[in-house]
Image (cartoon, coloured by chain):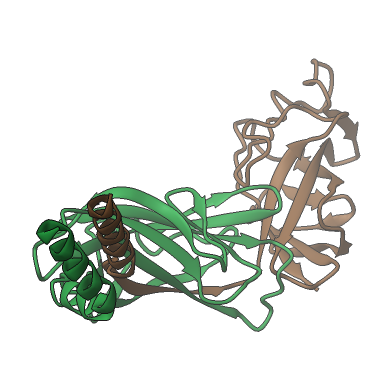
Amino acid sequence: MTALALLCASAVPVLAARHRSVRVVKVATPAALSVSLTPVADGAPLHSDGTAGAIDLGAVSYVAARRDGNVAIEQQSDRYTVATKFGLTINDPSSHVTTASVTAYVVYPSRYVVRVDGVKIDPTPRLLFAHVPVGRISVHRLEVEIPNNVPADAETIINHPIQFAAIAE
Amino acid sequence: MKKFFVAGMLMLMFGAVSAFAQTTGSGTLTATATVQGSLQLVFNSDASGPALTGTGTSNATLAFGTIQAYGGSLATGVSRTAGASSFTVSAPFDVFVSKANVTSTGYTLTANVTDATNTWAIGSTAINGGGTVTATGTYGADSPFTLNLTVPYSSAAGAISKAISFTATAN
């Protein structure tokens, strides 16, 4: 009988204190991850202030010779692909996370197709990589596909933000 | 029985907490580029002309072979006419111009060669020092032309090798 009474007494506080339990666990949550975008030796110039990077593919055309060897142009019959490399690092200030998954999406739709490591990036987030080691730079290939029928008589500026998100595994 | 009930409740609660505590981070990469319009010109062998070396590229060679005013044999696709003071050898070839990121519907083709001895022409257009081959070129199709080389009888025998530069300009 005593045992039964104790059980009842312990069960009631647990149910009543559900909200307090959640708050305690949140305090133990590791700090947020960060995604750093960095230039690589054989990639195009990339200016980064940490989590925001801008990679400059320069002036591109179907037949243009490259200004350097770090931006490649691959011709197809009705389009061409401009490709380069960039670095991505996932950081965990709390050092609790060892691997993460990375998703990506383009911030707004465009007539230019963007791929990272061959995966087309859409306005809807999609999984790019899994089991990415935290704290280590990984090198990736960025491709922008330009259709020949896009008029550029007055020169068209491509400005294409890609949002990456890292999720602890 | 109540022990099992309480334990089950706790597990559910921790499961829910874990889902809300997912650790994430994000970064933005903005790719910038300036798209420029361009034309691409390649030479193709014509069905009735000699086979070009480097056909399908923008740097091809058309070989007339050994040529002479009278007699001898001409290479396949090469024809000859002999005049009063010179003879002319002719060979068809094709020009294929592609456009990318350009709104024009046609192009102008010019050609230029420097030769103080012989006369060069594309069709009826002399190109020594430059000439307009066509002002109404069509994109995306082989345009056939004939290269004519006129050699004076007064010139000494020997090899002739000249580079002809072609330029396509969007109309």
Residue A167 in sight from this viewpoint: yes
User: Is the residue B128 above or below the residue B82 in the image?
Assistant: below
Q: Position of residue B90 (x, y in %)?
A: 83, 36
Chain B colour is brown
Q: Position of residue A144 (x, y in %)?
A: 52, 61
In this orientation, which residue lies closer to the viewer: B168 or A120?
Answer: A120
Q: Residue furthest top?
A: B72
Chain represented in green = A
Classify residue B161 as left or right of residue A149: left
Residue at (82, 57) in percent of width and height: B139
Classify residue B134 as left or right of residue A152: right
User: Is the residue B85 above or below the residue B76 in the image?
Assistant: below
Give the quarter of the image for residue B24: bottom left
Q: Position of residue A39 (x, y in %)?
A: 25, 66
In this orientation, which residue lies closer to the viewer: B171 or A154?
Answer: A154
Q: Quadrant of the C terminus of chain B?
A: bottom right
Residue B120 in sight from this viewpoint: no
User: Is the residue A118 above or below the residue A114 in the image?
Assistant: above
Residue at (88, 50) in percent of width and height: B123
Classify residue B149 as left or right of residue A76: right
Classify residue B52 as left or right of residue B15: right
Residue at (63, 42) in percent of width and height: B57
For the image, the number of numbered tags is 0
In this orientation, which residue lies closer to the viewer: A8 or A56?
Answer: A8
Give the quarter of the image for residue B111: bottom right
Q: Position of residue A114 (x, y in %)?
A: 53, 61
